[in-house]
Image: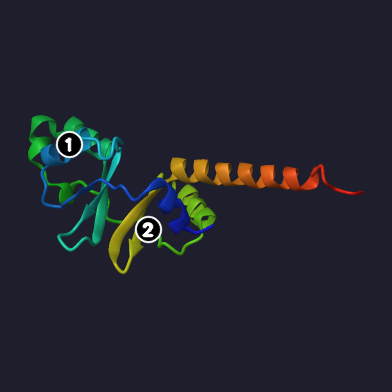
Amino acid sequence: MKVSKLLKLHGMLVLTVHPDFTLAEAARRFAQSVGGRRFSLAVVTSHDDRVVGVISLGDISHALGEFEGDAAKLLVKNVMTTDVYSCGLDNDLEEVLKAMADKGIRHAPVIEGEKLAGLVARRDALEFLYQQASLDAAHLTDWLFRSDARY
């Protein structure tokens, strides 16, 4: 199953921030829900929508713990993670989930043509695969136990 199929079902809502935002600005973006969803991770994009990193609520929390009130003035680019695992729309979703598990991460930006196209969240992807497997099992059961079978 391709990543594109997951994104068609779950949408392509992604919280984004710019590297030159302060942590206070980024925190305000986290505080606003997008499409009724709240996010724990934002993808850091340049002005031309290229992925340059990610920042999590945990990153902001750690900065607050280390720098206290001064953390609000720090720039996202000084706190973000720059070594980001990403995938494409044509990648196999199960392979992406395996890579995410191997790397100990819960989110992977989806890149199309060097620009952000969506985000794979482990929880959404696992739920999607479970639903697909349940549908497949129901179809098989219907097929095997059809009442119109002659023998």
Q: Is residue 111 above or below residue 34?
A: below
**Residue closest to the eye, 42 or 37:** 37
Left or right: 35 with respect to 22? right
Q: Position of residue 49 (x, y in %)?
A: 21, 60
- The extreme bottom residue here reads 113
Residue 58 on image: x %, y %:
28, 36
- Counting residues from the start of the chain, the first of labels 2 and 1 encountered is 1
Separation of residues labelled 2 and 1 (CA atoms): 23 Å
Residue drawn at the location 34% of the way across and 65% of the way down: 112
Q: Residue furthest right?
A: 151
Q: Going 20% across and 33% down the picture, which residue do you hit?
A: 31
Q: Secondary structure at mark 2?
A: loop
Residue 138 found in image quarter: top right
Which quarter of the figure has residue 117?
bottom left
Residue located 34% across and 62% down the image: 111
On screen, residue 143 versus residue 84, left or right, reads right
Amino acid marked by disc 1: Ala
Q: Is 141 positioned to the left or the right of 94 in the image?
A: right
Q: Three-letter amino acid code at disc 2? A: Ser
Residue positioned 16% across, 47% down in the render: 76
The numbered dot on residue 86 is 2
Q: Position of residue 41 (x, y in %)?
A: 29, 42
- Position of residue 96 measured from the top left corner of the image (x, y, whole percent): 48, 55
Q: Give the crowd class for mark 1: few <14, some 14-19, many >=20 residues within 10 Å.
A: some
**What is the number of the mark on residue 27?**
1
Question: Within 10 Å of the Cα at label 2, are there few (<14), some (14-19), or many (20+) other Cα atoms?
Answer: some
Mark 1 element type: helix
Give whichever of 124, 142 is nearer the camera: 142
